[in-house]
Image (tube, grey):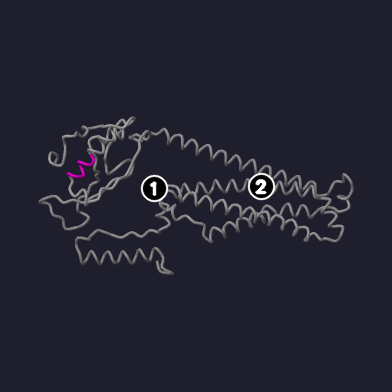
Amino acid sequence: LKPGVTVGRAQADLTSIARNLAATHPVDGGVGISVAQLATMRTGDLRPLLLLLMGAVGLILLIACSNLAALLLARNTARQREFAMRKALGAGRAALVRQVLTETLLLSLMGSGLGLALASGATRALRTTDPGKIPQLLALTLDWRVVLFTLAAGLGTCLCFGTAPALLSARVDAADALKEGGRTSSGTSRQGFRTAMVTAQIALSLMLLVAAGLLIQTLERLENQDLGFRVDHLMRGHFYLPPAQYPTPEAITQFCDRLTERIRALPGVRDVSVTAVHPPTDRWRMMFSIEGRPVSRLEDVPSTIFGVVDANYLRTAGIPVVVGRDFSDSEDRKSVV
């Protein structure tokens, strides 16, 4: 899209073009154009799963931040005499808050840098593995937006979970804290903040535990679901036959027959099949014409979903025959219409 052009405007322009094509070429009648964002097409059905994963990561981040806030509070409590000495020497409350926030900010930046380093290593590991049905993983990189988001998240956690310990540390009473075994006036506030942090940790951990339990239950049910074909002890391979060496269907058939015979003779092989499709989603859709039934519009052209298999396909894939019969070796392009 050009700068400033919305998806709706592009859809309207292409719809107008489709109408003009249909007016010029009647065969294009009823055929339209649909506009979709590339990001949506890339994620597809994975978007809900990615959002769920992001939510789980957010819960883990909140738990880690609450733990860090409690640790900072405990650390600052042990430094009360230090803060009291600084306050007695003339340091103001703002200076103490800046000191604690600076230490927390440095800790957040170190954590963000470590997270970016781990993310960079993980993306390289993903690119070296087989992407399978998600070829977009090959283009997975850490760009400047990821770096800015990580830094913003680190700064945000510093401000959200480091401000309260800093303010409580700055409220130390210098005279009372310098006394051996003295109690500070901020003890009640510290205790209340610590209790709130523990409560938040328990609540977030419980949410994460429930979500993990539901996810494990879902995966277990998917694992035990009957898909209608064999999912274990099945190996799939791909090969390409150059047309210069195999110019005719007969030559291709002879090669496939020899290949299956040699593979079937290998120890441990129960059966083998040569096919152009395999479950669960691979299939072709092709338009065809019926003799004596011409069509004037493209939308009226009949089409069907089909695949090319041999006589051993259903048996090898473990697909049961519900109605009808299985293929046989005697059926070929000459005997079947």
Q: Classify 10 Å Cα crowding around label 1: few (below 14), some (14-19), many (20 and above).
A: few
* 320 shown above or below 240: above
Q: Percent from the top left, x then y, of residue 84?
A: 84, 54
In the shown orientation, is residue 215 left or right of residue 20? Answer: right
Expressed as whole percent of the image width and height from the top left, the position of residue 153 reads: 60, 56
Front position in the image: 45 or 124: 124
Give the mark nearest the N terminus, 2 or 1. Answer: 2
| Residue 273, quarter of the rendered image | top left
Question: In the image, which disc is placed on residue 49?
Answer: none
Q: Main secondary structure of the magenta part?
A: helix
Instruction: Identify the residue position indicated by label 1 in the image.
Output: 133
Q: Residue at x 54, y 58 (%)?
A: 146
- Secondary structure at numbered mark 2: helix
The residue labelled by disc 2 is 66
Above/below status of 169 relative to 265: below
In magenta stretch: residue 266: no
Q: Residue at x 78, y 61 (%)?
A: 95
Q: Label 1 amino acid?
A: Lys
Residue 194: x %, y % from top left: 72, 45
Location of residue 158 by image quarter? bottom right
Which amino acid type corresponds to the residue marked 2 in the rendered image? Ser
Residue 255 part of the magenta-drawn span: yes
Residue segment shown in magenta: 250-256
| Pointer 2 local density, CA inside 10 Å: few below 14, some 14–19, many at least 20 | many
Is 3 left or right of 71, judged from the image as shown? left
Q: Secondary structure at mark 1?
A: loop
